[in-house]
Image (tube, rainbow, N blue to C red):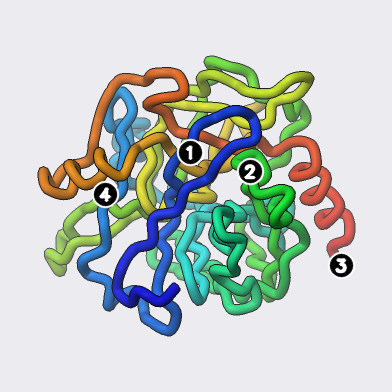
Amino acid sequence: MTNRGRIIILLLTSAAGLSPFSIAVVCLASNEPMENYRDLIQHAAVVDEDGRHTEEEYAQKKAVPLIAVQTRFSPTGILKCDGSELSAQLTGANNLVTTAGHGFVDTDSCKTISTPEKCTFTVKVGTNIRVSRVSGMVGTGISCPDFASTYHDWAVLTIDPPLDGITPHELPDEPEVKEYTDVISVSAMARDFVRKDPVTKKKTLPKSIEECQTKKAYGVGRTVLFESNCDLARGNSGGSLLKVVNGKDVLIGISIGNRESEAMLRKAERRGTPNTGPYVVDKWATFHVPLNSKFLNTVKTAVGNRKL
């Protein structure tokens, strides 16, 4: 990564027969702080209509206390690494984080982007900010060069200290993702999801919450990749896709990318607004890796090995 001060646009190619698509991780030139990147490329695709809300907006929509919304979605936070920033979430235990694998390895060149032990994971409940360091990678689906496809794009990390007091997202009992299921997409931040602080008047990148729906699922015998009409932007990679089961938020998958082309991206940059369009299978959609198979087994093993 030698081009300083520029976003690197990565492409993934799926062995499931899908064409390349863009991923939504903010990739930084090494040794540069995030705040120096004021002119980052806006990479965003809105599917159907922009249904994303801030925590405050979601609380108002649901007519519930703000603290209830902040607490409910507190497991989703920002994973800040030496070469990237992603969304991630506490999963199954207070010392276990799941996210997208492409934040650590360029799946096109197989070059290392970030080192897990140089990452921090931050969650926020209101004004209470909690930070923990990544202590190691338990496992990832990416194993270059043989397994660098879209449906291997996951990573499981341990953090220290554990973030006690934050209820992690539940693991799925039914790991197969069904089409046309109501879900909630949560991301720690997104480059095109901007609000102005009412006090300081400065622009902020708040957590986004969106009610959306799963669409086409890919795979024979089990789902290896699936689409949704949830919206995606840089910073969404690794974010939570939740299904409410018996009143609990169950993590059924993570967000990894979309089908927006570089030409479309450039038009959006010139226009100053994200590209939007109705959901079209395999063309205008957001893609997710399901929490099943080896991904789920890796999480379960790590949860079982936790020292209490």
The kind of residue tagged 4 is Asp
Q: Against 215, is 113 above or below?
A: below
Disc on the earlier residue, 2 or 4: 2
Q: Nearer the viewer, residue 59 or 24?
A: 24
Q: Nearer the viewer, residue 224 or 176?
A: 224
Q: Residue at x 43, y 84 (%)?
A: 31
Query: Residue 306: image x %, image y %?
Result: 84, 63
- Residue under pointer 1: 20
- Residue 44 in the figure: left or right of residue 303: left
Foreground: disc 3 or disc 2: 2
- Residue under pointer 4: 192
Query: Residue 108: image x %, image y %?
Result: 55, 54
Disc on the earlier residue, 3 or 2: 2
Disc on the earlier residue, 4 or 1: 1
- Residue under pointer 3: 307
Query: Residue 250: image x %, image y %?
Result: 64, 36
The kind of residue tagged 1 is Pro
Q: Is the C terminus in the top left, top right, bottom left or bottom right quadrant? A: bottom right
The kind of residue tagged 2 is Ser
Q: Residue at x 68, y 31 (%)?
A: 224
Q: Quadrant of residue 262?
A: top left
Q: Residue at x 47, y 42 (%)?
A: 257
Q: Against 244, is 83 above or below?
A: below
Q: Residue at x 72, y 40 (%)?
A: 171
Query: Residue 174: image x %, image y %?
Result: 76, 26
Does any portion of residue 300 appear in the rendered image? yes
Q: Nearer the viewer, residue 77 or 12?
A: 12
Q: How much space separates mark 1 and mark 2, taking CA atoms?
A: 10 Å
- Residue under pointer 2: 149
The kind of residue tagged 3 is Lys
